[in-house]
Amino acid sequence: MHPVVRLVAQRIALGLLLLIAASVLIFVGTNILPGDVAQAILGQQATPTALANLRAQMGLDQPYYIRYLHWLFAAMHGDLGKSLANGQDIATEIQGRLANTLFLAGVSAAIIAPMSIILGLISALYEGRWPDKVLSGITLAWVSLPEFLLGYILIYFLAVEYPIAPSVSTVYDSMGFWAKLHAIILPVMVLVMVSVGHTMRMTRAAILNVMQSAYIETAELKGLRPFRVILMHAFPNAISPIVNVLMVDLAYLVVGVVVTEVVFVYPGMGQYLVDHVAKRDVPVVQAVGLIFAAVYIGLNMVADVVSILANPRLRHPK
Amino acid sequence: MKRIPLLALIGLAITTAYFLAAIFAPLIAPYPMGATPGGSWQPASAQFWLGTDSIGRDLLSRLIWGGRITIAIATVATLLSFTTGAILGFTAAVVGGWVDQALSRFVDLIMSIPSLIFALVVLSVMPVTVVTLILVMGLLDSTRVFRLARAVAADIVVMDYVEAARLRGEGRIWIIFREVLPNSLSPLVAEMGMRFIFQVLLLSTLSFLGLGVQPPLTDWGGIVKENKDGIVYGVPAALYPAIAIATLAISVNLVADWVLNRTTSLKGGRNG
Amino acid sequence: MADQGARALLEITDLKIEATAYPPGEPPQDITIVDGVSLQLQKGRVLGLIGESGAGKSTIGLSAMSYGRGGVRLTGGKILLNGQEIRTAGPGKLRRIRGHTVTYVAQSAAAAFNPAKKLMDQVIETSLQHGIMGRSEAEKRAVWLFDTLGLPNPTRFGNRYPHQVSGGQLQRAMTAMALCPKPDLVIFDEPTTALDVTTQIDVLAAIKEAIRDTGVGALYITHDLAVVAQVSDEIMVLRGGKMVEYGPVDQIINAPRQEYTKALVTVRQIEHPEKPADAPVVLEVDRVTARYRGTNFDVLKNISVELRQGQTLAVVGESGSGKSTLARAITGLLPPTKGSIHFAGRELSATLAGRTRDDLRELQMIYQMADVAMNPRHTVGTIIGRPLEFYFGLKGDAKRKRIQQLLDEIEMGKGFIDRYPAELSGGQKQRVCIARALAAKPKLIICDEVTSALDPLVADGILKLLQELQKVEGVAYLFITHDLATVKAIADSIAVMYRGEVVRYGPKSQVLSPPFDDYTDLLLSSVPEMRLGWLEEVLAHRRMESAGN
């Protein structure tokens, strides 16, 4: 087998293994830690009978591994269980929300990727001069703020003082594409701002790292135009680290989305998760946690696969 | 004494000021933590420098008290994550073999789930107390410290001077504390600043989501949560903690940058 | 180009090159790297630039392309290329010169080739981009150059990626890349330094032939006078950025005028009479075989050597011969799979963990890179003092007195005890490592390439010191090296290693006299000698031999 195929297959297998392990971790985290779910739901004054009934109803009287396997197989068939808080089927509730979250994250990613590459390139080209310093200063300020604070600052200035966008991102199914886009202007801005700083800095570092290689000096000493040096010699070698950084940072959007949705009361997965954590609704937390972990693991896996594919040493073995 | 660059000096000064304010909060806060001396959301005045909050408490005092809790919890969590992460990371690098493999794979697993999501999952079943918060925040973050400490130590362990020490017959304690530690201190100290900031942000986020510090105590994230409804009426009360967090984060970043640069220039000076 | 007959190809006058240094914790300082250097090169001639590290030779070489590496600035003087001033030329004009009129061959071709592109595309890129020739013509020329440079399969060689060919081949490919656009001048920057000695001779011969066939002028930069003597018409000796001596190669080699040049010419001519084999044996390696974990081939195969008290055994070989692995097996870092090691009359445990403190103390090691062999956070006093404390329990004044005694022995005197390694020169660092080994009062010191990272004159000093210490302390050395000149200077007996085996072993006089086995013959005849015409002699000799077979 070609080594690249083997490595990619290995990496995908590792991703699946990690996902299984993560599901165990989530299950263990919600079950074996001190603190009794039934007690937590019913409170300290609950009668022993009520506790026993609830435990039986939730299947808590079965051995852990049986419950885990039940849960995992059901999840693999699309059955994520029922919410404890309102008895609704979780899979049905999630559908629309997942689409909303993917819409928000997708629009943000579509802005983040080109923006960080372009800004990173500018920063690298003007290393140490004013465009680099200005960009580095602005992005340092952005990454120093948590998402929710950035959200309220934007609401205060762009929705209240100079109203150009709605402060609450209400979306529903019958809305048109552009109306939806208008509704999520501010949350997208927040996600872009918190991500671009880091992604841009890493892109800059990746380009500078390649630009310091001896083969770039060789290209310069060949009397090539700067544009050709960057396009033909730097870019093919920088693409793998840049894609890697992008994927890892897009995976991090998972976290940003949770908080941003709460700030803008956006009907997505993040808000759903936070609501149900507060209600100690374990099945929902498990299900949503698993989906977030899957997305995160998946994107990190894509990052590694791209690195493998972009490596000339692996593509053209001796 | 080496010359400290201006930016690092500013960062150092602001960071120190924040920590002093946290320690001496009872002396400098104009009002006690729970006192309600005014009406709801009064504008800034001579009596209330930053105005009052949603139920009439002095915002400046709330910020000082909230900062005390934010900084205290973040500091303890950082210390916890550093002791755990660094000791395990060094051990993994120096001992190697299956110990290294087991620890590293476990850390890979924990890090395959984003910290915030993991924290939310755990906090959905655990009682939310200050101790739980510190444990969850500290242990989750110790995975990152582990990776850094292991990577730094792994670079040092292959150096000839460590081999020379092993050939001399030195034990693991000498190798970890006399050979590895002095050479990995600077990157770890710089990382400590970054991890501290991360803890401040994580704690604020959790509190904002209602899963962090619980009333009657409050932290900066909690103050945002209490006052967020004012934003749409043009009351900026929820923005003040933002300024506090941002200035602290930037200051610590500046100090960490300086520590890191000092290390690199020290390395560069080895030939000179 | 008839009008260029009288004009020099390259004429540098009173060149001054500066850079900015950033000492930690201090304001940046401007330092002068090259000062007042002038030279002239005619078309078709080769000028050798020689000097130790920090002499400014590479910097001068690159100035012929008006290029300053890493913030280096060409601040004064004239650089005339074909009569045109290029030091102050603008970027557009420099682009037309670089890669067209002047090309460059770097020391590490492995790093200088773009890993993502095929060799052919990189070799002909300049010719196409500068519009010198069309693709098919350029490819034809590249194939011809591959052939001239002795590369295997010249027609298909260019389809490979850089990581798919060996170091020696890459170095030749880089030469082809430099010659392809038909330049007037090529700068060779230590093109053979990173290669093994048996590979070096082939690359050297290939470069010399290619220079002759294409008629270019060349600047040949190296630290090895014997190498440069083979390819140059003239030599300039540099030291600390200043010119020491400049003249025809014959005069520099055979009648140097300056003291420094004389020292360079006579370096590595230390004479060491072989000691009689009557002392008791201190180390006996008996049929040792070893392999690294997780691999399926032996890196050491059935090795047997012995070393007598107060004597030196040199283990010679090229990279990959297993000579450093032998040291690891003896020290216990790589337990042998077969065989035994006897030391000072007892059998050593195969593993490090199984050895007694006396085993460890009596067997010390000195490393190639003194830089990384000392903890940068420890002072010289701590570094030398630790074995005293660890093995002999010395403390306080007694320890400090003994440290000073050891510092005196390595000729470093007072004032070093509280310094850090970063404050020492390369030679001083290696001396401190020697003192650390001596502090343990060892019976045997393993010296792993201890002089190969040092400039020749400094290396000479270290070798003399080691010999002096052997006389005084009676310690035995196991001396691992790839450099035969060092072997001649220090050994009593020699083991030649090749691919994990000892191919020749015995007293020095016997190993270095004919009849030779094939490998030892190849190795010995590949070491450059400091006389004119040596390269041609060897090549002619080898052609004769292969014709005879």
Image (cartoon, coloured by chain):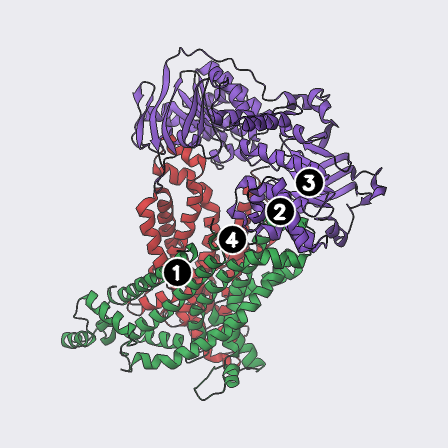
Whether the residues at callouts 3 and 4 have beta carbons within 8 Å, the answer is no
Kindly tell me whether residue B209 is visible in this rendering: yes
User: Could you tell me which chain the residue with mark 1 belongs to?
Assistant: B
Q: Earlier in the sequence, mark 4 or mark 1?
A: 1
User: Could you tell me which chain the residue with mark 2 belongs to?
Assistant: C
At x 81%, y 45%, the residue is C85
Q: Counting other residues with Cα less than 10 Å from the Cα at mark 3, is it few (<14), some (14-19), or many (20 or more)?
A: many
Q: Is residue B63 above or below residue A172?
A: above
- Chain letter for purple, please: C
Q: Give the secondary structure at mark 2.
A: helix
Q: Counting other residues with Cα less than 10 Å from the Cα at mark 1, is it few (<14), some (14-19), or many (20 or more)?
A: many
> On the image, numbered disc 3 is attached to which residue?
C187
Q: CA distance from mark 4 to mark 2?
A: 54 Å
Q: Position of residue C391 (x, y in %)?
A: 36, 25
Q: Nearer the viewer, residue B138 or A177?
A: A177
Question: Among all residues in the image, which is located at the extreme front?
Answer: C548
Q: Which mark is residue C143?
A: 2
User: Could you tell me which chain the residue with mark 3 belongs to?
Assistant: C
- Chain letter for green, please: A
- Chain letter for red, please: B
Q: Nearer the viewer, residue B238 or C135?
A: C135
> On the image, numbered disc 1 is attached to which residue?
B73
Q: CA distance from mark 2 to mark 3?
A: 21 Å
Q: CA distance from mark 3 to mark 4?
A: 44 Å
